[in-house]
């Protein structure tokens, strides 16, 4: 345990709310890397590594670097421990295996490009680094990206996370694996008793924290600046980012944060440790921990999936001392600049989206907004709204914007750090599946400037939008401000959101109308009803 705690001790960081005075200027160029070629050989705390050239010969990539020991055998359901040192030079040419999960190779709207690419193993705690630095004397800003997957899947080797395009803009990009499902989020009374912290269940989050600690100790070898780290993620990765800002164990390990499709709902409630331990006991079926640790990984995975157990982060009293919103309300979060937002059609993967009849729509509104059903139905399903399908979609879109505004307002009550909000509304070209529109995860190829990784009939507007979005993200990673030369102004005013689509423009969020009707549920001005 002491070795694990040592992994979390960060280097001293400058004030998180102010950009460094020596930060590199913002740029929208994708040709910043040195023509001489980037580093190919580095030494990290466990030994020497040899990377590989990227498709851009001025860049290098180091894949499959272990940041923790394999969590197998007796290490299953324990905090990550440092990897064993190696002798000689270790090849970092290939990705590690992804953490154990059940992968569906095609689950629309998420196609192959959104899925883990390799085999699965419990021996999976590794990360990947893309860099254009020519020497370890450089100090480039660092992006640490946490994959999504509902805390049950995902991997750092997903094609759309390829870091070459962002590395070409001067950022050192890191992606990582962390334990998911039953392996990452399993609580049990015996585990809590043995932990030394009276806690169990958040092993996946502990993996993320260990990876951030590894970055603090080692990223300078890749030309990265450990004092200028941005932690980012999408979907469950965005949820992880919010959890990391709330966790005392992650304090000081990053300077700013990006949460894509992740406005936190202040009424979102994580299970308490006692609740999660009860679920763990039910899954154990009376078997001792030794027997559970001896089970083959695939058998344990299948058993948990068959039981329908919800494995996700919990309030364990150690990694997460309380609910995220409660920690923010008390000002106990890491108060760092935030870039956050969502896509217009987040729920288009759900079968109901735009397909309900009048009765079904009324039931949906009743379930979500019991205290405002009549008013919302009058607004969305009244005589002036003959297109019931579009009304359903607009309800979902307005609900997302309401959550976004409420989260920003809550942050402002206890923190001073700036935040920038976006709303991605480009329906990516997809003639075969037009119903998904700007679906959950649709912004990923634009953010990473990786349109070529996804087989779609891209248009010039898509390439322009990808360049614009990657430029915003890189500027924020550099300095905490996404604005830069040649880009439409992106205000940090909490009443405005930047719309990213065929046109890029900032707009005021409506103060009245539908968003006001929904606001009570997310702001806390009305009592919770579910």
Image (cartoon, rainbow, N blue to C red):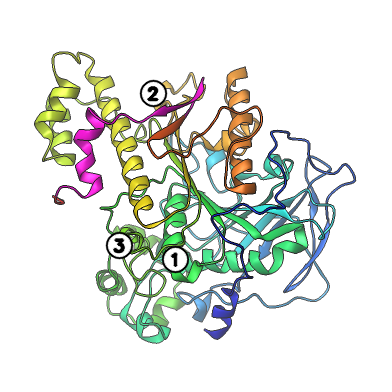
Q: Is residue 129 left or right of residue 273?
A: right
Mark 2, mark 3: which one is toward the viewer? 3
Q: Is residue 461 left or right of residue 362?
A: right
Disc 2 secondary structure class = helix
Q: Disc 1 designates what residue?
A: 184
- Residue at 29% x, 73% y: name it: 277
282 or 389, nearer to the observer: 389
Kindly tell me whether residue 333 is visible in this rendering: yes
Q: In the displayed structure, would residue 387 be above or below residue 360?
A: above
- Residue at 63% x, 42% y: name it: 474
Q: Quadrant of residue 386?
A: top left
Q: Whole-Å distance between the Cαs marked 3 and 1? A: 24 Å
The range drawn in magenta is 499-526
Give the number of the disc on residue 435.
2
Labels 3 and 1: the sequence-earlier one: 1
Give the number of the disc on residue 326.
3
Q: Is residue 350 left or right of residue 479?
A: left
Mark 3, mark 1: which one is toward the viewer? 3
């Amino acid at each position: 345990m002491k070795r694990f705690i040592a992994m979390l001790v960060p280097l001293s960081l400058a004030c998180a709310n102010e950009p460094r005075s020596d930060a590199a200027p913002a740029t929208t160029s994708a040709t910043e890397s040195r023509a001489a070629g980037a580093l190919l050989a580095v030494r990290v705390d466990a030994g020497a590594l040899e990377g590989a050239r990227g498709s851009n010969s001025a860049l290098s990539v180091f894949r499959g670097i272990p940041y923790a020991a394999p969590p197998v055998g007796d290490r299953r359901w324990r905090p990550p421990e440092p990897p064993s040192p190696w002798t000689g030079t270790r090849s970092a040419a290939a990705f590690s295996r992804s953490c154990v999960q059940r992968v569906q190779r095609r689950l629309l709207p998420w196609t192959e490009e959104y899925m883990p690419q390799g085999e699965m193993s419990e021996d999976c705690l590794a990360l990947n680094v893309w860099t254009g630095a020519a020497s370890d004397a450089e100090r480039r800003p660092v992006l640490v990206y946490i994959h999504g997957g509902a805390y049950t899947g995902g991997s750092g080797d997903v094609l759309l996370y390829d870091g070459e395009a962002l590395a070409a803009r001067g950022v050192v990009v890191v992606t990582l694996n962390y334990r998911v499902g039953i392996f990452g989020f399993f609580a049990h009374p015996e585990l809590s008793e043995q932990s030394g912290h009276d806690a169990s269940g958040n092993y996946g989050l502990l993996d993320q924290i260990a990876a951030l600690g590894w970055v603090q100790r080692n990223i300078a070898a890749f030309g990265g600046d450990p004092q200028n780290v941005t932690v980012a993620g999408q979907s469950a990765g965005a949820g992880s980012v919010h959890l990391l800002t709330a966790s005392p164990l992650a304090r000081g390990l990053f300077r700013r944060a990006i949460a894509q499709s992740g406005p936190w709902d202040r009424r979102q409630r994580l299970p308490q440790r006692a609740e999660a331990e009860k679920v763990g006991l039910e899954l154990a079926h009376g078997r001792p921990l030794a027997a559970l640790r001896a089970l083959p990984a695939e058998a344990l995975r299948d058993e948990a999936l068959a039981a329908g157990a919800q494995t996700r982060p919990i309030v364990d009293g150690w990694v997460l001392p309380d609910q995220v919103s409660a920690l923010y309300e008390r000002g106990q979060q890491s108060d760092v600049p935030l870039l956050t937002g969502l896509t217009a059609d987040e729920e288009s993967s759900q079968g109901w989206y735009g397909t309900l009849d009048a009765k079904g729509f009324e039931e949906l509104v009743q379930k979500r907004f019991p205290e405002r059903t009549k008013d919302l139905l009058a607004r969305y399903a009244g005589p002036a709204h003959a297109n019931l399908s579009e009304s359903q979609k607009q309800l979902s879109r307005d609900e997302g914007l309401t959550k976004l505004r409420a989260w920003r307002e809550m942050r402002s009550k206890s923190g001073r750090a700036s935040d920038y909000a976006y709303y991605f509304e480009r329906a990516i070209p997809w003639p075969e599946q037009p119903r998904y529109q700007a679906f959950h995860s649709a912004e990923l190829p634009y953010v990473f400037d990786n349109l070529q990784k996804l087989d779609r009939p891209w248009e010039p507007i898509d390439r322009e939008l990808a360049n614009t979005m990657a430029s915003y993200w890189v500027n924020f990673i550099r300095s905490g401000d996404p604005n830069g030369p040649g880009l439409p102004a992106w205000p940090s005013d909490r009443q405005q959101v930047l719309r990213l689509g065929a046109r890029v423009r900032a707009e005021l969020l409506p103060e009245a109308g539908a968003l006001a009707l929904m606001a009570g549920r997310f702001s806390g001005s009305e009592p919770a009803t579910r």
